[in-house]
C-alpha cells in the first residue's frame, strides 16, 4: 500500500490537524506564502514521490486566494511525482452559480471544477455540495459527504420533546434535505416560500405545511452566507407562533452582516460545522460549532484503502 500523506492549505488548518489526529498521522510539511507582487508560492517540504496525497482546502473566503492556493498545491504535488492526488474540499465555493439562469452569465461551479481537474487532481472529496449535480462537473471521481448525521445528533441532543419538533425547509430548493432530516428525527415538515430579490436580500412569502404554532422549529440548510434567509425565515416562524427556532447548517460562510442579522433574529441557537473556520469575533453565544473531522478522516482512510464511502450514510442522509 502506498503511503498516505496529508497536507493543508491555509484555509482551515485546525480542521486539517483534527483530521490528522483522528488518523494518527502528522500533518505534512508545506511552505505557503506570497511573493511581494501577490503571486502565491508553495513548496512541499517532504518527499512525496509515489505517495497517496490528500490536500485539504475548503474554498471559503477569501475564495479566489484559497482556490488558487489549492491549484498550485496540486501542481506542486503532480510535479513532485505523487502517485495520486485527492483534493479534500470540505466547502466548495462558487457552487451557487451552477447554471445559466439568465443570459451572458458564467457557470462558475463548472469553471472551478475544470481548473481543479486540469491542475491535476485525481479525485475530489467534498461535503454537502450546494447541488449534488455539481459532482458531474468534475471529470474525476467525486465523493460528496453529508454532514446530516452530525447535524441530526445536535438536534437530538436538544432539550426538546420529539413530538414538539417540526423540521422547516428555509426554501423550496431544500425540501429534499429537510424531508431526510424530518424522517430521521421523526418530525413533521413545513416549508418557507423564499423569494430572492438580489444576492443579499430575500423575502419569505408563504409558510407551507405545519402547523408551527406551539412547536419548536428546526431549520436545516447547506450554508449560511449573509444570514438573510434564516433570519427572515425565523421571523416568519415566530409570527406563526413557533415557540423557538433552531438552525443547523453545514457551511458557516457568515459573510457581510451575517453575525448582526443572526444575533438580532429570533434564533435560539445556530449550529454550523467546521468545514469553514469561524473567527473568534464571529463566535457569538448562540453559535455552536460541530466537528466533521471524524467523518472526513474516516472517508480519507476509506479512499486510501479503496473502501466504500456510501456505507457511512443511510438513504435518508443522502
Ligand atoms: C440557497 O439556496 C442556500 O441553500 C442558502 O439558503 C443560501 O445560500 C443562504 O444565503 P444567505 O445566508 O445569504 O441568505
Image (cartoon, rainbow, N blue to C red):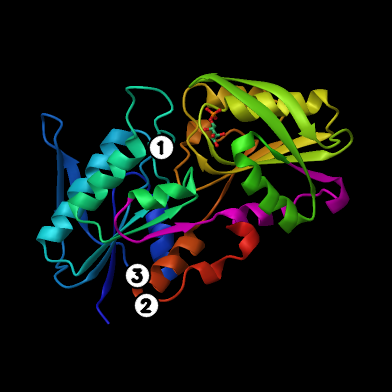
Q: Who comes first in sequence, dot 2 or dot 3?
A: 3
302 sits to left or right of 140: right
Q: Where ligand 1 lies, by quadrant?
A: top right
The response on whether ligand 1 sits within 8 Å of label 2 is no
- Is residue 44 among the parts visible in the rendering? no
Q: Is residue 228 above or below residue 94?
A: above
Quadrant placement of the N terminus: bottom left
Q: In the rendered structure, are the residues bearing label 2 and label 1 in contact, judged by CB atoms less than 8 Å apart?
A: no
At label 1, counting other C-alpha atoms closer than 10 Å, the crowd grade (few under 14, some 14-19, many 20 or more) is: some
Q: On the image, numbered disc 2 is attached to which residue? A: 305
Which disc is residue 124 wearing? none
Which disc is residue 25 wearing? 3
Q: Who comes first in sequence, dot 3 or dot 1?
A: 3
Q: Secondary structure at mark 2?
A: loop
Quadrant placement of the C terminus: bottom right
Seen from the viewer's position, the closer of residues 8 and 229 is: 229
x, y percent for residue 146? 53, 56
Magenta stretch in the rendered image: 138-167
Q: Nearer the viewer, mark 3 or mark 1?
A: 1
In space, the residues marked 2 and 1 are separated at their CA atoms by 32 Å
x, y percent for residue 147? 55, 54
Q: On the image, numbered disc 1 is attached to which residue? A: 98
Seen from the viewer's position, the closer of residues 310 and 20 is: 310
Amino acid at each position: 500500500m502506498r503511503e498516505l500523506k496529508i497536507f493543508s492549505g491555509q484555509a482551515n488548518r485546525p480542521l486539517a490537524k483534527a483530521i490528522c489526529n483522528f488518523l494518527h498521522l502528522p500533518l505534512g510539511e508545506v511552505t505557503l506564502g506570497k511573493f511581494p507582487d501577490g503571486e502565491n508560492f508553495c513548496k512541499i517540504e517532504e518527499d512525496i514521490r509515489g505517495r497517496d496525497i490528500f490536500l485539504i482546502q475548503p474554498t471559503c473566503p477569501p475564495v479566489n486566494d484559497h482556490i488558487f492556493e489549492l491549484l498550485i498545491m496540486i501542481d506542486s504535488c503532480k510535479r513532485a511525482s505523487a502517485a495520486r492526488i485527492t483534493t479534500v474540499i470540505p466547502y466548495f465555493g462558487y457552487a451557487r452559480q451552477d447554471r445559466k439562469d439568465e443570459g451572458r452569465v458564467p457557470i462558475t461551479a463548472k469553471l472551478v471544477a475544470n481548473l481543479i481537474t486540469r491542475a491535476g487532481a485525481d479525485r475530489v472529496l467534498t461535503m454537502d455540495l450546494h447541488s449534488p449535480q455539481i459532482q458531474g462537473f468534475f471529470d474525476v471521481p467525486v465523493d460528496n459527504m453529508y454532514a446530516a448525521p452530525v447535524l441530526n445528533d445536535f438536534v437530538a441532543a436538544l432539550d426538546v420533546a420529539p413530538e414538539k419538533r417540526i423540521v422547516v425547509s428555509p426554501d423550496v430548493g431544500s425540501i429534499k434535505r429537510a424531508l431526510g432530516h424530518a424522517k430521521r428525527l421523526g418530525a413533521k415538515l413545513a416549508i418557507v416560500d423564499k423569494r430572492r430579490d438580489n444576492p443579499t436580500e430575500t423575502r419569505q412569502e408563504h409558510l407551507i405545511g405545519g402547523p408551527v404554532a406551539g412547536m419548536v422549529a428546526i431549520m436545516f440548510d447547506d450554508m449560511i452566507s449573509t444570514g438573510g434567509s434564516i433570519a427572515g425565515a425565523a421571523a416568519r416562524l415566530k409570527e406563526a407562533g413557533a415557540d423557538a427556532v433552531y438552525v443547523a447548517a453545514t457551511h458557516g460562510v457568515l459573510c457581510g452582516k451575517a453575525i448582526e442579522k443572526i444575533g438580532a433574529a429570533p434564533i435560539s441557537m445556530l449550529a454550523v460545522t467546521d468545514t469553514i473556520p469561524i473567527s473568534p469575533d464571529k463566535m457569538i453565544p448562540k453559535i455552536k460549532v460541530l466537528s466533521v473531522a471524524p467523518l472526513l478522516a474516516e472517508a480519507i482512510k476509506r479512499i486510501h484503502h479503496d473502501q466504500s464511502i456510501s456505507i457511512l450514510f443511510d438513504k435518508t442522509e443522502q
